[in-house]
Amino acid sequence: MGARFLVTTPVPSPGLELLEAAGQVTVLPEPPDYETLGELCASGDYDVVLTQLRDQVDAPLLSRARLRGVSNYAVGYNNIDVDAATANGIMVGNTPGVLTDATADIALLLILGTARRVVEADRLVREGKFHGWEPELMLGHDVSGRMLGLAGFGRIARATARRALGFGMEVIFAPRPPGDRPVSDEELGEFAGKVRQVPWTELVERSDFLSVHVPLNEQTRHLVNANVLERMKPGAILINTARGPIVDEAALVEALRNGTIAGAGLDVFEDEPRLAPGLAELPNTVLLPHVGSATVPVRSEMARLSALNAVAMAEGRIPPHAVNPDAWA
C-alpha cells in the first residue's frame, strides 16, 4: 500500500500534485473541528496529516494518533504540542525561510497604513464624504524620522528593519523579550552601527512604533499586556505580524479606546478568526486577515515544502524541515 495523506484544507499547487504522486490523498471539504481531526488521526487510515495553524494538535490528540508525521503548512507550529509528538514518535515538519520578505512587507504596510489612517481615509472617500482638500483632513503621524522598536530580531524583524531604515526611521531592538541577551556587531552583520539594542523596558517606552516579532511560547504569551501598553508613548502605534496571543487583545482594545496609545495594525489575533469585543469598531486600527505570507509565490513554496516534508515522513525519512528530528531516534 502506498503512502496515505490527510490534508485538512486544500493547499496551492504544487502541494497536492506532489502528494498525489507519492500516494493516496484525502482532502477534507471544510476545516475539521477538533473532535473530527482527532478521530481521523486515530483511525489508522493515514500516515501523515498536513495541517494548518487553525488545527489544534495537542497532547491528548497525539496520544491517540496513529500517524508517522504532522506536516504544518506554516513556519510557526504553536498549534502543535511538539513535546507530545516526540514522545509519541510522531515527526513534525514546518516551512521555514519562505515568508520573511512577504511578512516584513505587511509589517511596513501596517506601519504606514496605521500612521497615515489609510483605512479611515479610504472609507471616507467611498462613503462620499470627501468634499475637497482641507488643511486638517485626516491628519496622521509621521513615519520618517520616527523610532521603530522591534520586539525580537530574527529574520522577519531584520527584514522589517531593512525596510524601515530605507524610510529614514531610527531602529532599536530587544532580541528576546521579556528577557535579554547581548548581540554582537558580528551577529548584527549588515545592521551593525545602524540599529541599537536596548532592554525590553526601554524599547516599550521609547518606540513610536512597537512591532512584535517573537515566537509564541509561555514566556511571550501576553508579552504586550495592559502594563506594557500603559508604558508606551501616548502617540505610539502597536504592530503585530507574529502571533495573536502575544498581545492581550482585551487590554489593547481598552488602551485604544481610552487613548493610552494612538493606534494598532494587526495581521494576527488572539483567538482567530474571532476578534476581542470592540476591536472591529475602533477607527484607529488596521486589521488584516492573517495575510503576512499571502503572495502567490510564497504560498506555493509553502505548499511545496509541506508536501516534501509529508512525503519524506510517509516514506520513513527525516523530512527536509523537521521540527523534532529526535522523534524517530
Image (cartoon, rainbow, N blue to C red):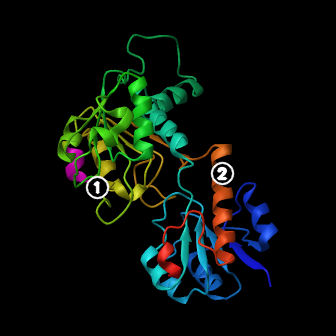
Quadrant for the N terminus in the image: bottom right
Considering the numbered disc 2 on the image, is that residue within a helix, a strand or a loop? Answer: helix
Residue at (75, 54) in percent of width and height: 13
Q: Which residue is mark 2?
A: 301
Answer with mark 1 or mark 2, whichever residue precedes in sequence. Answer: 1
Percent x, y of residue 209:
32, 35
Q: Is residue 196 above or below residue 280?
A: above
Residue at (59, 72) in percent of width and height: 318
- Asked whether 95 or 221 is in front, the reply is 95
Considering the numbered disc 1 on the image, is that residue within a helix, a strand or a loop? Answer: loop
Asked where in the image residue 305 lies, by quadrant, the reply is bottom right
Percent x, y of residue 272:
49, 59
Left or right, 243 with respect to 306, comes to: left
Q: Is residue 197 above or below residue 179?
A: above
Q: Is residue 279 magenta?
A: no
Residue interval drawn in magenta: 225-230
Left or right, 4 with respect to 106, comes to: right
Percent x, y of residue 324:
48, 72
- Asked whether 283 or 87 is in front, the reply is 87
Q: Amino acid at mark 1?
A: Leu
- Asked whether 34 or 167 is in front, the reply is 167
Q: Tell me, yes or no, if residue 283 can be seen here.
A: no
- Label 2: few (<14), some or many (≥20) within 10 Å? some
Mark 1 or 2, which is nearer the eye? 2
Left or right, 111 with respect to 14, comes to: left
Q: Amino acid at mark 2?
A: Glu
State the count of labels: 2
Residue at (68, 64) in percent of width and height: 307
Percent x, y of residue 172:
28, 35
Q: Which residue is mark 1?
A: 223
Asked where in the image residue 143 lies, by quadrant, the reply is top left
Alpha-carbon distance for marks 1 and 2?
A: 31 Å
